[in-house]
Image: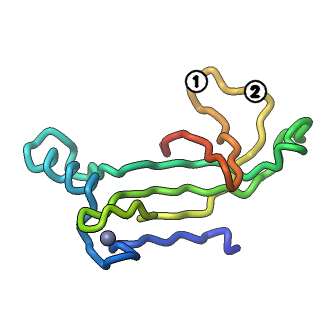
Amino acid sequence: MDKDFHKTFDHCPACGSTLQFCKELGEELRERGLARPEFIMRYDMRQGVVVDQNRAAPMPIGINLPGGSITTDICMDCGAVYAVDIQRIEGRTQAAPLPTGNKPLPAFDKFSLGNIRAN
Ligand SMILES: [Zn+2]
């Protein structure tokens, strides 16, 4: 996969609607002046690296692992939950979590996703 892979989807793959439930809720908040102009609400955002759990320990420190960022929303016309943004990222293994809150990316595989916000 291209390391710069990044794709966005602006309509429902099932019915073609462009109305996204959580995005609309966020816009309502912005219109009332209760959120920043750039604020965009989404149903879920997950980010993590891919790890084979049978080889996770001992994983060498400082190696790059392929990972991804997945953002979803809900179609207001048919209820489908679908990806609105998918992006390949890189994560680096670390010795221990940093005390400042800069956490290493969690591992995910096809069955479980790490659960941290971007930024
Ligand atoms: Zn739909």
Q: Quadrant of residue 101?
A: top right
Left or right of residue 37: residue 42: right
What residue would you read off at disc 2? 96
The circle drawn on residue 38 is none
Q: What is the quadrant of residue 62 in the picture? A: top right
Mark 1 residue crowding within 10 angstroms, few (<14) / some (14–19) / many (20+) = few
Residue 68 in percent (x, y) is at 61, 57
User: Residue shown at 69%/27% (left/top)?
Assistant: 97
Residue at screen point 43% across, 70% down: 8
The residue drawn where x is 52% and y is 57% is 70
Query: Eyeballing the image, is 35 above or below 66?
Result: above
> On the picture, is 49 further left or further right than 6?
right
Mark 1: secondary structure: loop
Identify the amino acid type marked 2. Ala
Residue 100's disc is: 1
Q: Nearer the viewer, residue 53 or 40?
A: 53
Residue 48: x percent and y percent? Answer: 63, 48
